[in-house]
Amino acid sequence: MEQTYRLAEHFISINGEGQLAGALALFLRFAGCNLRCDWCDTAWACGKDAPHENVTLSRIKEIAEEAMAQGVRTVTLTGGEPLLQEQIADVIRCLADMGLRVEIETNGAVALAPFQNSGACFTMDYKLPSSRMEQHMLTENFALLHEADTVKFVCGSRADVFRAKEIAAQFKPQCPLYLSPVFGRIEPAEIVEIMKEQHMGNFRLQLQLHKFIWDPNERGV
């Protein structure tokens, strides 16, 4: 029997954050997550009973071909936690072989080593104290990141920003570092002030573009 994947939704939109913010991408959102972050903005896709369609690799390839016909050259695997899908490496390789740039949004609690030669770029979260999930972080992942990858520190408080600085100093990831405010919990201007005070020139502030363009709770954007 052909392997199936729990696909919660798929759509074309702009990347809302990261190194390709503002660029069109195909989004493949997979259902299920091993964390329950306090401020999660896609909690609907995280539970065992999350709404989804069981799709085959052939169907995913069809979705990707339709997106490429519309000029899309990047595909973002997100969730939930996409790396929890059984045989997801087959999906990554297939999409990369089609000529797409494959980006994976991963939560920092899944080992990246099995996917190092998959042809994908990673946007890896490090869960800070306000998430209540920091104890689940696999810090050995930092050593596997490269310049094309990204570390995202989602900040819900001032303490989170200071913690992000500590983690970066300790593990020294060799890729861009982003500070992303939790929408409605901390003002971006406050993060900028801390960056200035703490000499955090190795970080970049990023805002989630899709939450300014559309309603913050809207799906499929």
Image (spheres, helix red, strand yellow):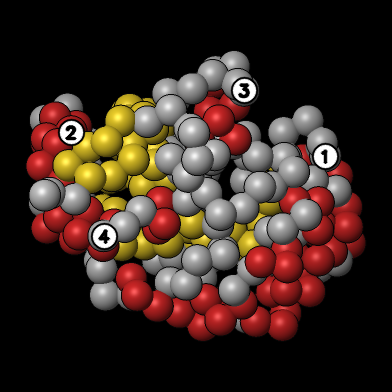
Q: Mark 3 belongs to which amino acid?
A: Pro
Q: Earlier in the sequence, mark 3 or mark 1?
A: 1
Is mark 2 in CB contact (under 8 Å) with mark 3?
Answer: no
Residue at the location (56% across, 54% down)?
Answer: 34
Q: Which residue is mark 2?
A: 63
User: How far separated are the C-alphas under marks 3 and 4?
Assistant: 32 Å
- 190 vs 43: above or below: below
Q: Nearer the viewer, residue 54 or 60?
A: 54
Q: Earlier in the sequence, mark 3 or mark 4?
A: 4
Q: Which residue is mark 1?
A: 186
Q: Mark 2 belongs to which amino acid?
A: Ile
Residue at the location (47% across, 51% down)?
Answer: 81
As drawn, is 184 to the left or to the right of 84? right
Q: Which residue is mark 3?
A: 216
Residue at the location (43% across, 45% down)?
Answer: 78
Q: Nearer the viewer, residue 49 or 107?
A: 49
Q: Mark 1 belongs to which amino acid?
A: Ile
As drawn, is 85 to the left or to the right of 124? left
Front label number (1 vs 2): 2
Q: Earlier in the sequence, mark 1 or mark 2?
A: 2
Q: Residues within 10 Å of mark 1 (few under 14, many from 20)?
A: some
Disc number at residue 87?
4
